[in-house]
Amino acid sequence: MEKTRCTSQIYNMPTTTLLFLLFLCFQTVECQEPKPQPPSQSYSNPPRFDNGPKRIVVSVFLGALTGFSGAIVFAFMVRFFIRYMNTTPILKGSVVFSPEINRKTLQSALSNETHHLGSSPNGTYYLTPLDNGFTVAVKRLEPTVGCSPETQSKSVKRKIQQELEKLANLNHPNVMILRAYVRETERFYLVYDYVPTGSLEDAMNRVRENQLELSWEVRLRIAVGVIKGLQHLHCSCVPQILHYNLKPRNVILDSEFEPRLTDSGLGLLMPNLDRASSGYSAPECFQDCRYTDKSDIFSFGMILGVLLTGRDPTDPFFGEAVSGGSLGRWLRHLQQAGEAREALDKSILGEQVEEDEMLMAVRIAVVCLSDMPTDRPSSDQLVHMLTQLHSF
């Protein structure tokens, strides 16, 4: 009954009063809702990392440095391993490159120096017949003081062996091929084909003694063969091979007077080569101990001068001649004076065409004998110059 009364009272209230009560209710609810708490001070600002970029850069740098160092160490280890695997073993006893030579037969034959062929301060030549009837020329290299094969280090022995193997691989008709070598306690033995005709020095000595006649055609063929052999050493071999001791004694002639260079490249193996007393060495070899392919060209110019004049460079005549002192200076003086014909060997003077060729060859010899290496032609150029003088 009471509930009905209250309800009726509410319905009987004025409209304005009801609106006022509703407004109060909404305000009360709004006031009772929890206000959002302001974020705490600890979350208002992000944490500060002042050293962050520096730490990243340092870490990257140290990582790269470590990786780079490791790569270098690994590369060196691989390189050392490859070099060790490719190291040439040091061979002992006889090393034979020709199928015509038996190793045991060669070793036993070396004790029989049957015929002496010649000597020099750095070695002795003699011929040795083998059991199969094949005859070889052996050069016995005298050891340098303090540098015998027994006392040489492994690196020196290996270098000598590699140089000898390089000489054994030469393949040119104007270069003497090394057929074998023997390493013993005190010395080396180098084995070549035996050529019975002898050397250019022997031939020119016989010419001076009127025991042999060499025409200009033969002499020019010898000069062309010598320069072609040098061209092969200088231009076709990689790395380049220098002769170091080019002179008539080291030019072997076959039965057709075709020349073959011997002792090529031995200057690297024998520091006591007798270049100083030979009269064929370039001036720079004495001035600053420098040797290049142009030094070989100077020696060739001396050989060409010997073929043209018939004179030995050590002949006392050059010390007495006007502007003398050497074969090269004498030739240069006569050429400048227009008297080059006076230098020619009288035994080869003949037809006018040959005389013109010889006078041109004198000019070539003078250029080869220039004091400055840069003024000398190359072996390539000389082959072209000399072959133009005559048809080969």
Image (cartoon, rainbow, N blue to C red):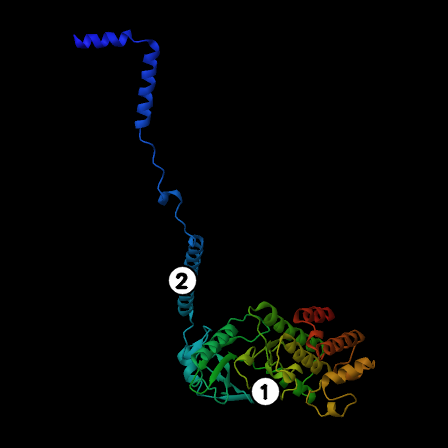
Mark seen at residue 274:
1
Q: Can you tell which quarter of the image residue 111 is in?
A: bottom left
Which residue is located at x 43 percent, y 86 percent?
151
Q: Position of residue 194 (x, y in %)?
A: 53, 80
State how far apart marks 2 and 1 are (Cα).
52 Å
* Vertical side of 325 occupied by 80: above or below: above
Name which residue type carries label 1: Asp
User: Would residue 175 be found to the left or right of residue 384 on screen?
Assistant: left
* Vertical side of 224 occupied by 75: above or below: above
> Can see residue 236?
yes
Q: Position of residue 3 (x, y in %)?
A: 18, 10
SS category of the residue bearing label 2: helix
Q: Can you tell which quarter of the image residue 202 is in?
A: bottom right
Which residue is located at x 72 percent, y 81 percent?
308
User: Would residue 61 be found to the left or right of residue 275 on screen?
Assistant: left
Which residue is located at x 23 percent, y 9 percent?
7
Name which residue type carries label 2: Gly
SS category of the residue bearing label 1: loop
Q: Position of residue 126 (x, y in %)?
A: 52, 86
Quadrant housing the C terminus = bottom right
Quadrant housing the N terminus = top left
**In this figure, which residue is indicated by the disc labeled 2?**
70
Q: Nearer the viewer, mark 2 or mark 1?
A: 2
Tell me which numbered mark, 2 or 1, is placed earlier along the sequence.
Answer: 2
Please rate how many residues cluster around mark 2, counting C-alpha atoms within 10 Å: few if below 14, some from 14 to 19, many from 20.
few
* Vertical side of 141 occupied by 161: above or below: above
> Can see residue 346?
no
Please rate how many residues cluster around mark 1, counting C-alpha atoms within 10 Å: few if below 14, some from 14 to 19, many from 20.
some
